[in-house]
Amino acid sequence: MNTTKTQPPYRINLNQYPESVALVHQAVVEVAKKHNFDVYLVGGMVRQGITNTNTNTNTNTNTNTDMDYVPFLRNSTNSTNSTNNTDYLQFAELVAHKLRTKGVHFKDNTRLNITPHKQNILFPKATNNNLSITVDISKPRGATIEHDLTQRDFTINNLAMDMNNTVIGNPKDILHKTIRVVNVSALKNDPLRVLRAYRFQSTLGYTIHPQTCNLMGENQHLLKGIPAERILKEVRNIFASSNLDTMLQTLYAMDKNGIIPIIFDDTSIRLETLNTIANSKHNNNYNWWHKLQNYPHAFEILFSTTIRLSNNPTTTLRNAAMSNSEQKLVRTLYQLCANTQSPLTTEQIWMHYNLIESIKWVYKLQNNRTNMEKLNAILATLNRQKGLTLTGNTLIEHGFQPGKQFKTILLNGQIAMATTTDTMDKIIEQLKKDYPMEPNKN
């Protein structure tokens, strides 16, 4: 006789979501009911919904706007082959029509973007219409939602919410903030899930279960076969954590487990930088961390100061799938600041003037007060506007010809303009002595 007690159904309160998000969900459910589908909300929105419902946080504070759905056509004759059917494409088209938008088709899902402008048209009386909402409608991974959930990565993600807001699955690990693989083959089936576990640790502050840690160690070598773009995306998410402590704990764990050399080609983590960041908590001042994350080059700064590049940084950065502009910025920051303790020269500062704010962040992360003071002292003496009055056209007017040395001549002239009291004529006269001009062939 089965004496196991049946747990009461766990329901998510939709009031916690922004009104426009709840209205989009309502529209998706209406389409499902009208066209004989069962649709389930899955992913991070369910996880956050369970967390907030459990803590009675039900006042539109859940700002997650990534909505992931899995639809099943009722009484489908293709039920035995549902992982290969196209019912989800039909459902996506119906939802797109309902929301007056168009979907973008990927391999196994269709994505709809509901812009703030579109929300104002669809829900003119709703609040919080300034959020960008993404709706993903994915192909089922099994014949039923229960089968689908067994194919997912971690137990904090193998839950779903049905059309009555009832949770399917056991929310125990979410409530206990534990990251645990759904099954022992989950990491082997997709090794990127190793990095995803670190990402959840960094962004959610959850603890990785010891058995899952062991499985991660056994499978992390398989990351060598994962496309670099996917790896870099997860690393960006690790650095994007809003919780400084959990981000540091994650990076320390990655260093301890030797995962950085695997994913970034013989590089390692700069522990001295991490230690400096960790010690900053004693100053009770975390505002700088959030300011840095809002800076346009935040990821590049964190990467260049935290990751110790190999002897071939160009190859490392290319293998990390960084864009050319990202590679250039990381190399520059690394060469100027992250790889040396010597302060920048006036020439270096002028040459990379547009990176000065980035360099300040690097020095702050390194806790390098000496270099910061010297940098500020040099900046205080520079008159950037005065220096920029010497232009390339000015040099050409004085007989200089564009060529290999032209940029060097211009830079030295601008530095002299910014750091001396000499007149422009005197500086140009000196430049002609330092860089004798070839006779004009015309």
Image (cartoon, grey):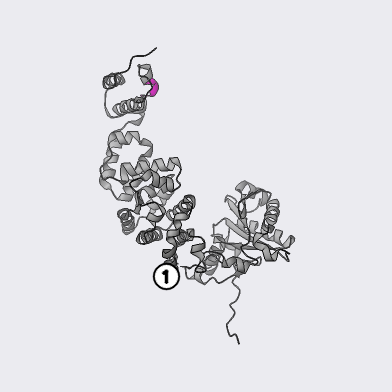
Classify mark 1: residues with Cα within 10 Å, few (<14), some (14-19) or many (20+): few
Residue shown at the point (28%, 29%) measured from the top left: 419
Q: Nearer the viewer, residue 25 or 380?
A: 25
Decide if residue 240 is in sight here: no
Q: Quadrant of residue 10?
A: bottom right
Q: Residue furthest bottom?
A: 1
Residue shown at the point (60%, 53%) measured from the top left: 107
- Residue 391 forms part of the magenta stretch: yes
Q: From what the image shows, is residue 335 above or below residue 236? A: above
Decide if residue 191 is in sight here: yes
Residue shown at the point (60%, 87%) measured from the top left: 1
Image x and y of residue 96, in percent: 68, 52
Image x and y of residue 45, in percent: 56, 61
Residue shown at the point (35%, 19%) measured from the top left: 400
Type of amino acid under label 1: Pro
Q: Nearer the viewer, residue 377 or 210?
A: 210
Region in magenta: 390-394
Q: Nearer the viewer, residue 27 or 266?
A: 266
Q: Residue furthest top?
A: 442
Is 44 placed left or right of 389 in the picture? Answer: right
Quarter in which the C terminus is drawn: top left
Q: Quadrant of residue 382?
A: top left
| Label 1 secondary element | helix
Q: What main secondary structure does the magenta stretch of the protein show? A: helix
Image x and y of residue 423, in percent: 29, 21
Q: From what the image shows, is residue 341 above or below residue 171? A: above
Q: How many marks?
A: 1
- Residue 362 forms part of the magenta stretch: no
Is 59 placed left or right of 390 in the picture? Answer: right
Q: Nearer the viewer, residue 353 or 400?
A: 400
Q: Which residue is mark 1?
A: 210
Image x and y of residue 73, in percent: 70, 63
